[in-house]
Structure formats: structure tokens, C-alpha cells
Image (cartoon, coloured by chain):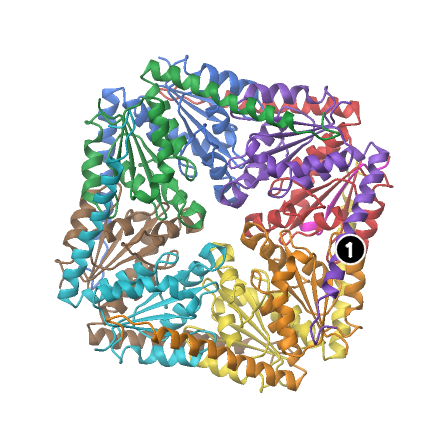
Chain colours: A red, B blue, C green, D purple, E brown, F cyan, G orange, H yellow
């Protein structure tokens, strides 16, 4: 079983945030890998990774980084595989990481999700893979359907609250 | 007793903030309802809600949302009933939710209150209803009067503080 | 014909922005007035205005202000008539005025619209008045319907654009 | 020839920015369509569009919006087709649109690119389509290669600049 | 002994911050008073206070407020007595209060100090009073001198830290 | 005639903003001086200036600076004469200068006015001087009175605008 | 004559800003080179450049970049030669570039100067080179001395301004 | 052994952040000193320090400051020794200190590192010293090499995590 999604982070301090991505991919039975790479500390490893990703069968890369977050953009520059960037909240409420990931110059896009949005990154990866995988597409339709159940449950909780003038 | 105000939120995680709205409406004896709806998860429910709100007798809608807060604007787009938006602080100190609610494009206003301003949303709803409800108008005049009492109490506390050169 | 909406601004420099509010109210045949008041320069006039607004038949107040924008909040403090605040862009891209209007303390809400959102303020005022005016309600339903026409026109323009691979 | 990418915008005022996306798709010979839709003005059209997109063969949606930018998120909520969001600079330097698009709640990702990043959105769309289109993959590899030429040209210009102490 | 400085706040929740102002005035033996006033809840009291301040012998007013902080500006509008504004950190890290106090329109200045800068407000008040009070001027010169002692103490602490290569 | 107010700036590029301060002081017949000083380029001159200011009869210092604006704070550190800081808009909309002036550490206040608020700085200076100058106090009362006239004029302009439904 | 400073930029659009750096180095007779490199478009060239810089005699690297500015950090990661980063104002007033350059993770510093601060970058480079170059050190002392002349000139201009009450 | 690096801070409250700089210098066996100085409280000491730094053998100055952080810029103005500024997070998430340090006016650069970036400041200092110290240059090359080990360790931790679909 070859991995189709590669989750990349620069340090294990990002792991508590990023495991939400791993869990979602696992739930959707999408084979994935997790790697530590750093745009700054292991640039050659990043280059090797990016240049081999497509031929290894990687179809989506999820790259997380905080502060002056360069990893997603640097990887995106070296591959045609779509790169999803996850800004990690480490300082300035994550605004620095968000801007350092999303404001890429012309020619090198990074598909950016919200601050600490690891699960959303995995959902986006699944949506991309589902374009050519009918079974996964069905699962994603089911997932979208299941999202509504939280609302049903929320409504039940709201109904349980009593006030004299609440109807 | 039909509800006149509808408090909408996307998740019960907003409840600790939004119950201040429920309490104020209850105190003012304004019949209200509470619903969970999501612009993203249950768009058809949102549409049904918005399109029936006026005919069901709803006169003000209070909609709370955090992050990329779309719910108040999406509801406002589908009804002529005034929509009051409450930005919930969930990330970036609530600034993302504030901008995503208040900066509506031309044609679709949302009456935005401050970040986590649930009680103020309910007061604003009451002011709107009081325009055609003399009894409620009296209550609101009384409420405004009562606000001053906090100042009286604050003054008493400040007087109780002793310094050699405090007069 | 008594005015039902009062448009307030602190200086005629706000007029180029605020005339969009006047035009909308005029189009909807809602009687309105325009006044210059300043929370800082004419506080007694503000007080007199706010305290008489309801008995004079004013049902919605639209108050515009820029920079450290105090006018909407100060008026809101002195009346039960709903106050809609319009942050005027005069410095810091209007962010100062937005925060100075929307972040009101508990007890005194201001229904804030977007930066320079004069037309939206007038639409919101019309929505509030339409709650007890069937004719205006019909007009507002029509207005909402008409908003779609811009989209139809936009679609026509987009269709007129030719590219080899545009379908 | 059925369109594979759908470029959506809420108003033709976004066209000067968004035509960079159309040009890139055209250059890459990717069949695409352009539509005007508004999360606020034509919610039913948005819903119809989003629910039929996949069965019509649309594989990527590029949605542009400014201010309290709801369109990308609302579409993303209704389809499993990946949605790329383009924040349009209309106020607050585009920061409001950026936050209103990227900070999506859990479950509904939008692949956000930089402010006014229309071309990057099209490149990202091409990268996604290239995952299952060998010919397009070749073109994208070539495109990445061509990006370097700007640097070569820049170097020539820099060499042409003369200073006494410039080597 | 008539008060020369008046410390004003809108709620006793500001007291933990503002007592640093009281302590400094007390230390400098400057007679002062503390009052609770609210631009929104007790506008007439604010007016009465502001208009009588000068004739009562008040020479500096220190006004604290958080969020959409209107109190300092509203008082400054009604008196020629210098008003020092203290932005209180209650939301958005205090940035809303800072902008709502400092960005006053032309004609009505507020002498703004830093967020939660209560002691600095009192020092500024003392500097103003010292202009016509030789004894206080001497004390302020001494206070400035004493500020250096913290540096001396800090140097001692830094010297006590040992590293092999610390000289 | 000895100067009572000293207007300080770091460069003549600040002059177009700061002349509003000079004009107001001149109008109020307050003797003043204008000097160029730089916290960075002429630190010894700044020190000499600050240490002699009080004995030369200077009673208020108005210091303008942009970007990483150090001048007001550095002067304030070296004198007991009140220092009014004017943040000049040179980059980042003036937010950098505002924060670099207003957020002074404990012990050294700067009385900060709004971005480019030169006239307000002069008014604040006049208010401080008026505490011990009955004639100036009268002029300031008159100035406050005159501010209302702009509102009267604005009202006349607003009345001159005709709409069918404007009352 | 081998270059000691290397000025790097990603595009000739940065040249109008960066030529201030070239001019200063030229004036100081410091041999320098100018190169176009891109962290995204020519990563291998960046790597080659960074790894050879020290052995080629480069002692300071000045790297400019806008938006999600990765170039300075990526170079800094691959060399022990000090890297000075210049954030270029291209969007969001340059705040995105500033944060993407200055907020580097632990281990890889970039010596960041202000937005568009090209000349300051060159001055900083000269200060570093002057540590081991007595002649350059003398020039830098002279440069610091010359900075004061602007103040003298500014003072002359301020003296030339006449007001009745200006002393 | 004379110190080559001087670590300066305004208060011992900055010590918990700044000791990371001391530890790194110590590890690299670079002789350093630590001093408390304040741009505001001990300006003459700052002046004396800055003017003697070069002749005392100081080759790099690391200056930390929070809020309206003037210390690094004021020192940089008085010496040709390179000054590295460390913005300390004390209010507004450190954004005030960052802007007050990095946005220096033309002529006086401060080499700014990230918020609380004490270790990075020391690394930068070591890089500068290594330009004329072959032994230190070797150590810095080794340090850069060692940074990669964290990535190796992170990869081991990531491999130890088991999911059914993790490859």
C-alpha cells in the first residue's frame, strides 16, 4: 500500500495539532505518511522529498508550519503535486504563519486552510483524491451528510434549555 | 405564544456566550426560540428558516457565529427580517468573526454588535420590538434607568477606598 | 409628514458617503431627516435630540462617525430608539471607527454596519420599519428580488467574454 | 467540450482581478466556465450550482469574493468538489476577505490563495487536474521550468546596472 | 483640601488597573478624588462633572475606559481641563480602547497613555501640576532620579548570574 | 518674549503636518519655538534640550515622529515638562508610530494624540497652559464654543439638500 | 576585486527599492554584487549561492522579498554568512513580508530591517564589515557624523518660518 | 578575557527571555557581558555605553526591549557596532515592540529578530563574529549541522505513531 497523502511538519511540537489530519485520513482509509522536514534545517531533504513525491505516488501534500512559515511554499515551489498549507498558531495568534503561507507570489500557489486547521486540510486532500476515486467520493458525500448530525444534536441540547418565555 | 425573536447558533459551543441573550429576552418577557443552524452544514434548513421567519411571526433574528462567520449574512440575504450578528471569539481574538459579519457587501446588511456581545444583541432586539409595543418600551426605559444604578454602586465602592490624599 | 428615520453625521465631510443612505430611504419613500450633531462639539444638542427622538416619531437613527467614533454610542445611550452606526473611513482604513462603534460595553448596543456602509444602514432601517408597515415590507421583498438582477447582468457580461477554452 | 473548472464571482467588479485565472486556464487548454453567483443575492442558484457541479464534470471551483466574503465557503459546504477561494481586495487591504474565506469552521475547508491571487488559483486548479491528466502534468512541469526564466531575465537586468564598486 | 486630580472610571472592574494611579498621586501627596461615571449610562452626570470640574479646582482629569472607550473623549469635549485617557484592556488586547481614545477628531484632544497605563497617567498629571507647584516639581525631579535605581538593582542581579564565558 | 511651548520634529518632512500646531499656538498668542532634533542623529542635542527646557521657561513640549518613533519618549525621559507625542503617518498607516509613542514603559508617560494630530497637540498644550493663565482659559472657553459653529454650518448645508421624502 | 556584499532579490520589481542599498555600498566603496534568485523558482540556484557565498568571500547577504517573503530565511538556513532581510511593500502595507522575514524559528536568524529599508540594510552591512576594516570604520563614523547635518539644515528651515508668536 | 558581545536589557523582567542568548554565547565560548540600561531611565549611561563599546572591544550588541521599545534604536544611533534588537512580548502580543524596533528611520538600522527571539539574536551575533574567527566559523557550521538532528529525532517520533492506514 503506497501513501497517497504526505503530512509534513517541521517539528513534533506541531503534532498535537496535526494528528487531526492523520485521524481523518485514517478514518477515510486513505493511505498516508508522516514526515518531519524543515525548509531551514534540512533543505536538501525537502528538495529530495518534493522532487520524488509525484513519482512515489503522493497526490496531495499537507505541510504545517508556524511563525515565518516557509515549508509549504518551499515544497510547493518544487513539485506539481498540490500543497495544502496549515498555519500553526505559535506566536501573534497564528497571523504570522497565515500570512507567510497564504500570500505566495505569482506562480507558486499554496492551498491554505485556517489557523491550526489540520482536519480541514485532510478533508480538502480527500476531496482532491475523491475526484478520481468513486469509493472515496461516496464516503465524502456521507461525511458531508454526517456533518448535519451535529446540528441535530445541537438542536436537541438547545431544546432542553428552559426559560419561561422560551417557546 | 409565538416566538418573536429567534436566537440562532451553529454549535452548542456558542451557548455559554449566547445564553446572555436568552436571559435578557426572558427577563423582558419577550417570547423567543433557540435554534442550531449552520450556513455550511444545513444550508437548506437555513433557507427554510429564513424564508418562513417573517410569516411565523419572527421579528428579529439574532445569529451568532465564530471564525469565518457566514451564518448571519447568509440568513440576512434570505429574509427582510432584521438580522443581528454576534461575532463569537474563537480565534484571532474574534477579529475574524467580526470582519466576516460586519463587512457585508451592498444590499445585505447585518446589524453587528461587539465580539461576544450576546446581551447587547438581545437589548437591540428589544429596542426594535419596542417600537410597536408600548409595554416593552416602558420596560426598556426602565432598563436604561437601571443601568445607572451600577454607577451609583461603583461610586459607593470607590468612596470606600481610603488614601491619605484621597478627598 | 414626520420623519421616521434620522440620519446624523458630525461633519459635512461625511456627506459624500452618507448620501447613499438618503437616496435609498428616498427611493423607498421613507420620510427622513438629516442633521449634523457632534458628541464632542454639541453634547447638549445630542442629548436633546436623543431624548426627543422617540416622541417626535423617529423610529430608527442612523449615525455616522469616523476615527474615535463616539456619536453612535453616545446617542444610543440616551434613547431606546435603535441606533445604526456607520463607521466612516478617515484613518487606519476605517478600522478605528469600526472598533469605536461596534465594541460597545454591555447595556448599550449599536447596530453596526460595514465601513462606509451607508446604503446598508438605510436598508437595515427599512427592514426595521417594514416590521410594522405592510407596504414597505412588500417594497423590501421587491428590493431583495431586484438584487438578483445584478447577478443576471453580471452573467451576461461574463458570457460575452471569449476564450478558446471557455465553454 | 465540457468545462472542468468553474470560475465564480459575485460581481463583474471582480473581473479585472479574476481574468488572470481565465487566461492561465486558457493557456493550459483547460476547458472552463465563468459564472456570476452570489451567496447573498442568489442563494438558490448557488445551491443548484454546487449540487450539480460534480455531475456536470466540474472538478475544481474557483470562487472569488471581497469584504465579508461568504461565496467560497457557502459553495464548499454544498459539494465535494474542491473549492479554491480568492480573497478580493475591496476594503481593509483585503484582510477582511482573507479571514472570511480562510478561517472556515471544521468540516468545510476552502483552499485559500493570496489576496487577489487569481492566477495562483488557476495554477492550483491545474495542479489538481494534472493528477489524473498526464498531458497536463507535462505542461505544468514545463510551466514550473518556465518560471525560472524570469529570474534569468532579472539577472540580466541586474548585470546591466553599473556602479563603480559593483562587481 | 480640595482635589486637584479626578480619577474617573466607568465600572469598578477597572479599579484593579486604576489603583496604580491613586497610589502614585497619594505618594506624591496630590489631593485627588475617584468617581464612577459612564458616558453611556450617566451622560448628565458626566456633563455636570465636566462643566464644574474647573471651578471646583480640578486641574487634571484621568479617565479610564475599555472597549469602545468613549468616556475620556466625551469629558474632554465638555471642559478645558486637560483629560488623560487610559485605555483598559478588556477585549482585542486593548487595541479597541486605545484607538477609541487616541484617535479623537480635530478640536478635542485626549492625552492618551499606554494600554492599562494607570501609573503613567498619574505621573503625567503630576508633571502638569508641577508646572505651577515648585514643591511638586522637586518631588518629580526626585522621582525621575529614583527611576534609575531599578537599573542599578537590575545590574546587580545581572552581575550575580554566572556563566563560564560571561565577563 | 520667551517661548512656552516647544514644537520638536526630526525632519522637515514632518512640517506639513506639524504646521497645524504652530498655527493654533499662534492664533492663541502663545509664544512658541520650533526645533529639529533627532533621538537618533543628535542625541546630545536632545539631552541638552530636554534638561534645559524647564529652566528656559518651556512648559509643554510637542514632539512629532514617524515609524519607530522614539523622539517623544526619549525627551520625556529627560525632563519633568509634559511631553505631547504626535505619531506621524509615514508607514503602516501610522500604526507603528502610534504604538512606538503611546506604549511607553512605566515611569515615563507621553501624552499621545491621534495620528497626524498636530492641531490637537497644540490644543492640549493650550489647555495645560490655561490652568495658570486666566486670559488663555477664556480664549479656550471661546474656542470650545466656536467648535459648535461648524455643526451649525453643517446643519445648514444638510438642510439645503433636497429629496422628495426628506423632511 | 571580489564582492563582499551580495544583494539578492527575487524580481526586478524590487529594484526601485533596493537600489538605495547599492548606492550606499557604492558610496562607501564596498565591493558588492547584485543577483536575482528566488526561493521558489530557482531553489537549486539559491542553494548553490548560499553554500558558496562564504568561500567566495561574501561577508554579508542582503536579501529582499515581498508578500510571503521566504528568500531571506531560506538563504539564512544554508549559510553561516549573516543575512539581512528587507521586507518589500507589495501587499498589506508590507506587514506580510515583515512577519514572514522576522519571525524566523529558533536556530535560523534573519537580521530584519524596516519595510522597504534598503539603505538601512546596506548601512548594517557596512557596520558588520567595519568590524574588521579600520578604514571603513572611519567612514562609518563620518557617516554617523554627517547624519546630524540634516538636523542642522532642518533647523535652518524651521527658523525661516515666521509667525507672530514664534520666538 | 574581554567581552565581545554585550547583552543589554532594561529590566530583569526580560531576563527569563534573554537568558537563551546568554546560554548560546556561553556554549559557543564567546566572551560576553550582561548589562541593564534604559533609554529612558539612564540615558547618560546608555550614551557612555554606546560610545565606548567599540573601543572596549564589543563587536555586537544585543538589546532587548518591550512595549514602545526604544533601547535598541537609541543605542544603534550612538555607535557603529552592529545592534541586534530583540522585541520582548509584554503587551499586544509583542507587535508594539517589534514595530518600535524594526521600523527605524533611514540612517540608523537595527538588526531585528523575531518576538522573544533571544537565541536567534545570539546566533546572529555568532555569525557576525565568525566572519573573522575561523574557529567560531567551524563551530557555527557544526551548529547548523546539528540543527538537522532535531528533524531526525522528529522523524523517529512520527514513525512511532501507528494508524491502520499510515504507511
x, y (%) of residue C166?
Answer: 72, 28
- x, y (%) of residue B117? 40, 36
Location of the C terminus of chain E by quadrant is bottom right
Counting from the top left corner in percent of width and height, residue H162 is at: 77, 40
Q: Quadrant of the N terminus of chain E?
A: bottom left
Residue at image coords 68%, 82%:
G132
Depth check: B76 or E18 in front?
B76
Image position of A143 with respect to F44: above or below:
above
Q: Is residue A9 inside the magenta stretch?
A: yes
Height in image: H165 above or below H82? above
Tell me: G136 left or right of A1.
left
The image quadrant of residue F58 is: bottom left
Q: Is residue D65 left or right of residue D141?
A: left
**Residue plotted at (24% across, 51% down):** E77
Q: Residues within 10 Å of mark 1 (few under 14, many from 20)?
A: many
Residue G140, placed above or below residue C106: below
F44 inside magenta stretch: no
Can residue D16 be seen here? The reply is: yes
Q: Is residue A119 left or right of residue C43?
A: right
Taking depth in this image into account, of C148 and E144 the one nearest to the observer is C148
- Chain part drawn in magenta: A2-13
Which residue is disc 1 drawn over?
G43
Amino acid at each position: 500500500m503506497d501513501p497517497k497523502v504526505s503530512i509534513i511538519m517541521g517539528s513534533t511540537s506541531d503534532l498535537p495539532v496535526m494528528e487531526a489530519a492523520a485521524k481523518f485520513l485514517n478514518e477515510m482509509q486513505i493511505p498516508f505518511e508522516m514526515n518531519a522536514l524543515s525548509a531551514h534545517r534540512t533543505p536538501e531533504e525537502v528538495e529530495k522529498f518534493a522532487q520524488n513525491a509525484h513519482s512515489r505516488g503522493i497526490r496531495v501534500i499537507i505541510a504545517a508550519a508556524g511563525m515565518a512559515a516557509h515549508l509549504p511554499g518551499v515544497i510547493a515551489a518544487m513539485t506539481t503535486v498540490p500543497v495544502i498549507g496549515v498555519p500553526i498558531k505559535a506566536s501573534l495568534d497564528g497571523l504570522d504563519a497565515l500570512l507567510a503561507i497564504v500570500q505566495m507570489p505569482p506562480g507558486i500557489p499554496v492551498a491554505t486552510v485556517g489557523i491550526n486547521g489540520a482536519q480541514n486540510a485532510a478533508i480538502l486532500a480527500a476531496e482532491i483524491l475523491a475526484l478520481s476515486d468513486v469509493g472515496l467520493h461516496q464516503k465524502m458525500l456521507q461525511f458531508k451528510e454526517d456533518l448535519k448530525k451535529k446540528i441535530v444534536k445541537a438542536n436537541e441540547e438547545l431544546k432542553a434549555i428552559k426559560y419561561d418565555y422560551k417557546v
